[in-house]
Image (tube, helix red, strand yellow):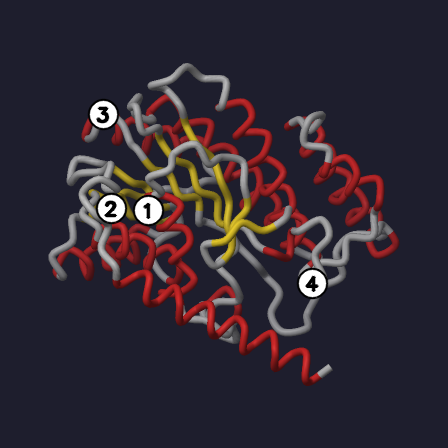
């Protein structure tokens, strides 16, 4: 077992080294579809992976809106980047509050007109280490799944019509994989429904999380075949993964010039507040795939799941 763990660590470290090298290679002129007028929004970006994605995108020359639920912390985070010469703006955004979403959209429309990239990073997790409490399941699902859906729905009308297409990137997790070795989803009925991408609908995803929350309320969730570790967080990310596929399918029907491409990625087990700083990779490496996806020159990629700049299975 130790040997296999060592091998997997070695493999991961090697891939992270490759990615660090790739990050040093500048995009060529023909790859750069963006300019300083290109606007990206990153939610939950006052620290950790979100902050790092703002920094990297601004470093590539985009105008980036850093959002945070806490105004004071968000203003300070944006100031750090502004003082570093980055074109970063700030606006408060609470993805659980419809009036906050409305205010944000109104501000975007008045100040920028539209956006090109939306990265949904805002999320919560209340378990660290080997804890697996479901006490805050309602909050975890509301924020990570419904909050993400709410901001996406509100922002779609504000996404720029352009030949290169607008991009939505959802920060999810391998813990939400349907056949992942980390999540161990034993509920065959749920797995079958979520794997059938042709029949998958938003309603099916909503029903799945409602079923989980009902079992939590009844105290029967442990026998429900849900993921064994970080259960509420894993279910919320499983739902966002499934919703990304539904969304991509729906958006692919838009005419050329109005396309929006939606993908999701796992940043890995990152050393941030969310993991109790127990992760094994840096925020810089964790943010990389999200930035890479947002800037992909090959715009036809949609409805996929990535980690370390490679496609992985849902």
| Residue under the image location 34 percent in, 37 percent down | 117
Of labels 4 and 1, earlier in sequence is 1
Write down the quadrant of residue 20 in the picture. bottom left
Q: Which residue is mark 2?
A: 90
Tell whether label 1 touches label 2 (CB within 8 Å): yes
Of labels 2 and 4, earlier in sequence is 2
The disc at residue 182 is 4
Alpha-carbon neighbours of circle 3 within 10 Å: few (<14), some, or many (≥20)? some
| Residue under the image location 65 percent in, 79 percent down | 5
Residue 164 rendering spot, x and y as whole percentages: 31, 29
Q: Which residue is mark 1?
A: 67
Q: Is residue 145 left or right of residue 121?
A: right
Q: SS class of the residue under badge 4?
A: loop
Of labels 4 and 3, earlier in sequence is 3
| Residue under the image location 29 percent in, 31 percent down | 115
From mark 2 to mark 1, how far is it between C-alphas?
6 Å
Q: Is residue 120 above or below residue 109?
A: below
Q: SS class of the residue under badge 3?
A: loop
Q: Is residue 45 left or right of residue 97?
A: left
Q: Is residue 217 above or below residue 165?
A: below
Q: Is residue 268 visible?
A: yes
From mark 4 to mark 3, how far is it between C-alphas?
42 Å
């Amino acid at each position: 077992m130790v040997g296999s763990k060592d091998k997997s660590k070695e493999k991961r470290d090697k891939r992270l080294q490759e990615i660090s090298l790739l990050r040093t290679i500048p995009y060529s002129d023909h790859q750069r579809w963006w300019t300083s007028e290109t606007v990206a929004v990153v939610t939950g970006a006052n620290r950790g992976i979100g902050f790092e994605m703002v920094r990297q995108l601004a470093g590539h020359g985009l105008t980036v809106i850093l959002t945070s639920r806490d105004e004071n912390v968000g203003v300070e985070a944006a100031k750090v980047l502004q003082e570093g010469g980055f074109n970063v703006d700030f606006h408060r955004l609470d993805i659980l509050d419809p009036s906050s979403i409305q205010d944000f959209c109104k501000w975007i429309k008045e100040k920028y007109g539209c956006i090109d990239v939306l990265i949904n990073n805002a999320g919560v997790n209340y378990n660290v280490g080997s804890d697996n409490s479901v006490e805050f399941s309602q909050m975890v699902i509301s924020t990570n799944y419904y909050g993400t859906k709410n901001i996406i729905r509100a922002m779609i009308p504000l996404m720029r019509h352009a030949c290169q297409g607008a991009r939505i990137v959802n920060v999810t997790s391998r813990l939400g994989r349907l056949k992942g070795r980390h999540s161990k989803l034993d509920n065959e009925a749920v797995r079958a429904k979520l794997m059938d991408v042709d029949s998958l609908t938003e309603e099916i995803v909503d029903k799945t999380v409602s079923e989980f929350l009902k079992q939590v309320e009844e105290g029967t969730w442990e026998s429900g075949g849900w993921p064994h570790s970080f259960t509420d967080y894993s279910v919320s990310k499983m739902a966002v993964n499934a919703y990304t596929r539904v969304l991509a399918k729906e958006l692919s029907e838009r005419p050329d010039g109005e396309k929006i491409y939606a993908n999701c990625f796992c940043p890995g087990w990152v050393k941030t507040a969310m993991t109790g700083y127990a992760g094994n990779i840096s925020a810089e490496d964790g943010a990389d795939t999200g930035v890479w996806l947002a800037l992909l020159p090959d715009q036809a990629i949609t409805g996929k799941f990535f980690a370390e700049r490679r496609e992985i299975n849902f």
